[in-house]
Image (tube, grey):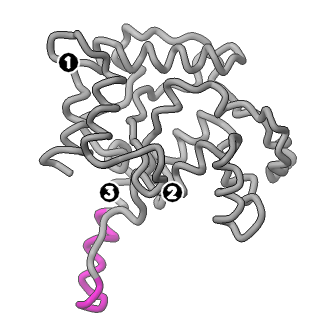
Amino acid sequence: WKRRKMSNFEYLMRLNILAGRSFNDITQYPVFPWVLSDYGSETINLSDPSVYRDLTKPIGAINQDRLDGLLERYADMDGFDDDMMKFLYGSHYSSPGVVLHYLIRQEPFTRMAINLQGGRFDCPDRLFFDIKSSWHCCQTNSGDFKESIPEMFSVPEILINTNKFPLGSLQDNRGVVNDVILPPWAKGSAHEFIRIQRLALESDYVSEHLNYWIDLIFGYKQ
């Protein structure tokens, strides 16, 4: 990998497997990083460092305002029951719910998501319906710290409601949840989105900073 004879995608997959993660277990599913931070521009320049996420920080520490609020809550926990373990983040960067969130449009994950919600789809506003909204949510929501999955760099079908599942309608007349709404720079194509995602993952910027994220997830900073 250091000699650039192995791609970042392959390196991350091997690390996930060595860490005991598997596509056969949604409780220990392979985890990948969000690598981009610009999901609103008409075009994207992958040579510009400003379009990338800060890989030196966990997803919950990128937005300083949210982190300050979380640290304040953490400090306030001193006044609670001594038996309660203090925590900074209220959810994990990878969990069965996170995996099903991303993969809800493709079986067998659709059925698993329905079972998780007691026999029905979750509230449409909580589904994976918009890339930009998902990134915004995991930067601002006090309970959302999810990272990404390998399919977000390799499988465009997870973004397309090929089975025409009735995923419901968003509040405030914002439309029906169907295919995932893509960034403008994807030009309405799930394949183009995945292509750019993969190019970003293999970019010089990510290659030079991926080791920091690996330390956070698999290494001494976890």
- Can residue 185 be seen here? The reply is no
Q: Quadrant of residue 30?
A: top left
**As drawn, 17 above or below 13:** below
**As drawn, 116 above or below 8:** below
The amino acid type, in three-letter code, at marker 1 is Trp
The residue sitting at 40% across, 28% down in the picture is 35
Residue holding disc 2: 96
The residue sitting at 21% across, 19% down in the picture is 208
Horizontal relation, residue 154 to residue 72: left or right: right
Marks 3 and 2: which is nearer the front? 2
Q: CA distance from mark 1 to mark 3?
A: 36 Å
Q: State the extent of the magenta-drawn residues as a range.
A: 71-84
The circle on residue 1 is 1
Residue holding disc 3: 68
In this view, the residue in front, 221 or 162, is 162
Q: Position of residue 80 (x, y in %)?
A: 30, 88
Q: Secondary structure at mark 2?
A: helix
In this view, the residue in front, 31 or 129, is 31
Horizontal relation, residue 30 to residue 110: left or right: left
Q: Position of residue 220 (x, y in %)?
A: 12, 47
Dot 1, crowdedness within 10 Å: few (<14), some or many (≥20)? Answer: few
